[in-house]
Structure formats: structure tokens, C-alpha cells
Amino acid sequence: MWEKGSRRVVREVMYLAAAVVVIMAFGLVFSDPFVVTLAGYTCAFALFALSVNIILGGIGEVPLGQCLFFGIGSYGAAIGIGKLGLSFEIALLGALVISVIGAAVIGAITLRLTGAYFSIVSWGLTGVAMVAATNLEPITGGPLGLFGFPQITLGPLQLGNQQTYFFVTATTLLVSILFLVAVRRSPFGAAMESVRQNQHLAQSVGVDVTRVRLKAFMLSAPFAALAGALTVPYAQIVTPEVFSVGNTVDSLLMVLLGGSQLIVGPVIGAAIFTLIPQVLDLDPNVRILVFSAIIILIMMFAPGGLHQLGVRLRERLGRARDVDPTR
Amino acid sequence: MELLVQTLVNGLVLGAGYAIIAVGLTLIFGIVGIANFAHGAFFAMGGYACYLLTVRGVNYFVAVPISVLIVVVIGLVTELIIIRRSLYGESHHGSLIVTFALGQAVIAALILIFGPDPLPVASPLGQSTLRLLGIFVTAQRVFILACSILVLGVLGLWLGLSVKGQQVVAVAQNPRGALYSGINVPWIRTLAFVLGVAAAGLAGALLGPISTIYPTMGYGALIVGFTVVILGGMGSIPGAMFGALLMGVANALFETFVSVSWTPALGWVLVIATLLFRPQGLLGRAQLHRH
């Protein structure tokens, strides 16, 4: 594996170049505003799926409450530009900082729990957040939410323009993926993987499990907040519904469809999750029904995600040289 | 004073409904070893089965047991096809996702079949109210209370006195030891799962006339169930009953004397406090680690 290091670098640069070309081509070729906006939104939501996967694929917990940070991002951006008159950049930055601080506080409490306990309590916290968002009307606009924002701009870029919006979200997504790849290859990434595989074993060889889990949680929060904030120019409204478990469920389905052990898995999942129903013109409930059924089948037969089937197939065909595509 | 007593009674009656949901959940957790995120879906199925039957002119009191039976059949099929295959020897992570996805699929299916709007379930008890010593309780809630006492009592006796019940307890305490003693552990797990979801279905059929039925009704039930079960200690049946009554009373008191709009957050605050100060729950056994 090591002697192939330079080839790996070349291959990765090619992947990156291909991704840039695909983004450019997509943004320039498709002029249908609906398609381009949808693609932009998909990229923003894929960021949220990445965040969910830091917890699911990273430390092996099911983060049913991840939409808490998504909501912090959405409300942070909305309150910042709508109520406080801040620029989008400042509001976004504020939301990111709040999400990290929130993750530190919440994680310190909830990460003492594992498995179902963690999932249930984090889900519960989003319930509390939803009640709070509904009741704190002067700040959050109550059940009707916040809407009617001024033009949202990021530096010189008009996010109201569909093409610009797509380029901004796609670029953010690409940069985030590169960052997460770097994290996964860092010593911290290795520590995270050891915690996921066997918490007790990791502890016994000197990994500070609690610390790693908390760091992963704090790492995941700003991505969710970023996703939440970037969906605001698309949705143009923020209601207490952003805290609904439905949001987290969508992203969990994306992660599981694409595969939780692949860094770009959530992005693939997001594309499948958004594009196929659009092409087939599926009712949202049919979509949930079909994808939930697929998830059950995946968990029964290929717990690592769809790409695991591909890996297995490759092994079957005797071309097992790159069995682990994440490394 | 009158108001306080009325509130306490309301709370206890509310808690009796919670207890049925929570006991099913805790039974599945204790014996099958999974947190059943599909519990709310079975709750909703009970409600919808009861709706379908009563709409076709079946008497409500007959419809309730038939609804439970329908949920039992669905639960048995689910256990044999999905739960058993995907979960044994799996981490919690897998069971959690599978049951959660199952719940989502059921909710989506209910929306597709019945539409998203609430539907009424007709009960002959209707809106009639009983008055006793100056306290008002609706007849339907008295019926729920009676069913709750009956079901929990029978379950308790069955677990304590019958051979099968003792086998269930044995599996909860030590699955491997139970297996070595010749107990058919997979079958006991199936039994526990089916009993658990049957309780959820019963709760759905009982609460339908009060709250109307709608596809996402299970979320509320699931959240309440988990709250209660964590309060009482996961896997502990007396804990679930105690937690349910506590939650019922706390909710009623908070709603009456503090704030209606903040009540949904109360359960979670209690849960977080419990997990911080007494992680095994109020009546749960302390364990080395909780997986």
C-alpha cells in the first residue's frame, strides 16, 4: 500500500479534478432554474449527511438529534440576517460558533451514554428545541417561523441566483469532503475508527474514548449548522420543523444508502435520495417507504452500505486489490 | 385543593395509559435486548385497526381485542422476517436503524393508505363523564385505567407464576444461562417481542377515541414510552409502571400549574436529570456498562 503512495496521490488529484469538472459542467450546462436549485439544495443537505456520518460512521452512534445543530444553523442565519440585520457571513459564523459550543455542552452530558440511550436522549433534545422554538415567539417567530429575508449574499455572491447558489453549496461540500478526508487520515481519525470498532479495546491501548467521542461530536456540529444555514436561501423560511426528526431521518437514509464507511457515501446517498424520486416523480411518502425498506434490506444483508455489495462483488471477481476504498 | 386532587387523578389516569406503552417497550428491551424504535408504529397500527373495525360497524369493545390480535400477527411476522434475522448477534447500532426504518416505513404507508389527517375512533363511552367525590373523569379514561390494571396485573402474575413467564424472566436475567438450562431462547424472544408490540397495539386502540388517530401518532407514544422507560430503568417492568405514573402526574401538574406550551419538554428534562444523577433509572439495577 505504501509503495503505491505516489500513485494514490495522482489518483486523488484526478478524482478532485473530476469533481470540479462535474460541478462546473453541471452548473453551466443545466440552465433549468428548478434543476440547478435542487442540485444546490442537495449539496447543502449532503453536508448535513456528512455531519451525521461523522457520528454514525465515525464513532458508531446513531445521532437521532443531529438536526439540533442543523436547526441552530438555520435559525442562526435567519435571526442574524432577519432580526439583527447582520450580514449572512457574520450570522453564519455566529451560528457555527454557537453550534460548536452547544455540541461541547450537550456532548459532555449525552456522550456519557452509548447506543440507544444516546440516540434517544439526543432525539429528546431536539424535541425540547422544537418546543422552545415554538414558544419563544419574540426571537424565533413562534410556530410560523421566520421569513421575508433581505437579499442573501455571501461576499460578492448573490445566493438568490440559482447558479451562484449551486456553485457556493457545491464548493462548500467539496471543501468539506477534502477536510474530512484529511481528518480521517490524521491520528485523530485513527483514534475515532478504533473507538468505533471496539471502544473497550481502544481504551485499553490508551485512547481517551470520552475525549475522542466529544471531539467527533464537536467536529460534526458545525457541518450540520453550515448545512442548516445554507438551506435558508433555498427555503426562504425557517420554522420549528427544522428540528423535526424527519430531517435527521432523511440524512440517515442518505448515509446508509451511500455507505457509512465511505467519506463520499453520504453525498452519493444524497444524490440517490433526491434525484431518483425527482426522475420517477415519486410522492415523498412513497420515497420514505421505499428507502426505509431498502435500508432494512441493506442492514440485513450489507450493513456497511450499498458500496459494500460492490466491494464484495469485486472480491468475488478476484480483483480485491483495492478492497478498502476509504484508505 | 379540589384542583390539585383533580390534577393528580388526571395524572394517574394519564400515567395508566403510558404504562401500557412503556411496559411493552421495556419488555422488548429487557428480553430481546433492542430499543424498539418501531414501537410507535405498532401503537399506530393498533389505533388504525380499531378505526377500520369500528367504521365497519364492529362494537368498540370487540374491536379492541381484534385490533390487538391483528397487531400480534403483524408483530409475529415482523419478528420472524426482520427482527430475528437482522438483530441477533448484531450491535445495537443495527437494531436501532432497522427498527427506526421500520417505524418510518409504517408511518409512510399509513399516510399513503389513510391520508395524513386525524380520523376519529368511535367509542360507545363517547364523551360521557363520571363524577366521584367531586372529581371528574371521562368514561373512556376509566376504561383505559381498568384495562391498564388488568393487563399489567395479568402480565405480572404470568411472569411471576407461570413456567413460561419464569422462562422469560430467566432470559432477561441471563440469556446464555437460560439457553444452557434448556430454555428455547429464540422462541422466548419472539414471544417477548410479540407481547411487547401487542401492548403497544392495545394502547393505540385504547387511546384512539381520546386523541383521534393519525399516522404520526406513534412518535408521541414512542417518545413518552422511552421517557418513561429511561426514568424507571430500561428493562425493569415495575420501573416502567412507576415511571409511567410519575410522568403522568408530573405532566398533569406541570400543565395545570406551570405552562401548557412547555409541557412537551418536561419529560426530556426529567430524563436528562435521571441519566445525570441515576443513570440506571429510578428502579433499574446498576450495571457495569450499558450497551
Image: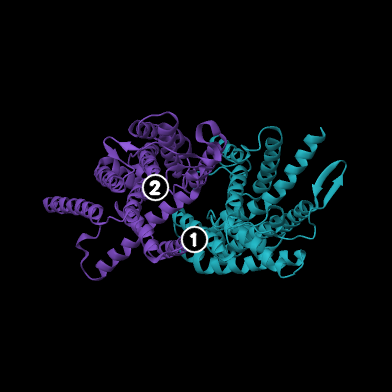
Chain colours: A purple, B cyan
Identify the residue at image location x=81%, y=32%.
B1
Give the answer, above or below, for where B153 lies relative to B74. above
Position in image of residue A98 (x %, y %): 41, 32
B160 or B42: nearer the viewer: B42
- Regarding residue A165, the answer to whether it shows in the image is yes
Q: Tell me the crowding category of disc 2: few under 14, some 14 to 19, or many 20 or more residues within 10 angstroms, Cα based.
A: many
Give the left or right position of residue A170, taking residue A224 as reference: left
Q: Which amino acid does label 1 sit on?
A: Asn
**Chain for disc number 1:** A
**Chain for disc number 2:** A
Give the left or right position of residue A288, taking residue A19 as reference: right
Identify the residue at image location x=46%, y=62%.
A283
Q: Nearer the viewer, mark 1 or mark 2?
A: 1
Q: Tell me the crowding category of disc 1: few under 14, some 14 to 19, or many 20 or more residues within 10 angstroms, Cα based.
A: some
Which mark identifies residue A52? 2
Secondary structure at badge 1 equals helix
The quarter of the picture where residue A183 lies is: top left
Which mark identifies residue A285? 1
The quadrant in which the N terminus of chain A is found is bottom left
Sooner in the amino-acid sequence: mark 1 or mark 2: 2
A4 or A219: nearer the viewer: A219
The quarter of the picture where residue A279 lies is: bottom left
Give the left or right position of residue A79, taking residue B227 as reference: left
Position in image of residue B5 (x %, y %): 80, 37
Q: How far apart are marks 1 and 2 (CA)?
A: 22 Å
Secondary structure at badge 2 equals helix
A121 or B107: nearer the viewer: B107
Q: What residue type is labelled 2?
A: Val
Q: Do the residues labelled 1 and 2 touch (CB within 8 Å)?
A: no
Give the answer, above or below, for where A161 lies relative to B93. above
Position in image of residue A71 (x %, y %): 45, 41
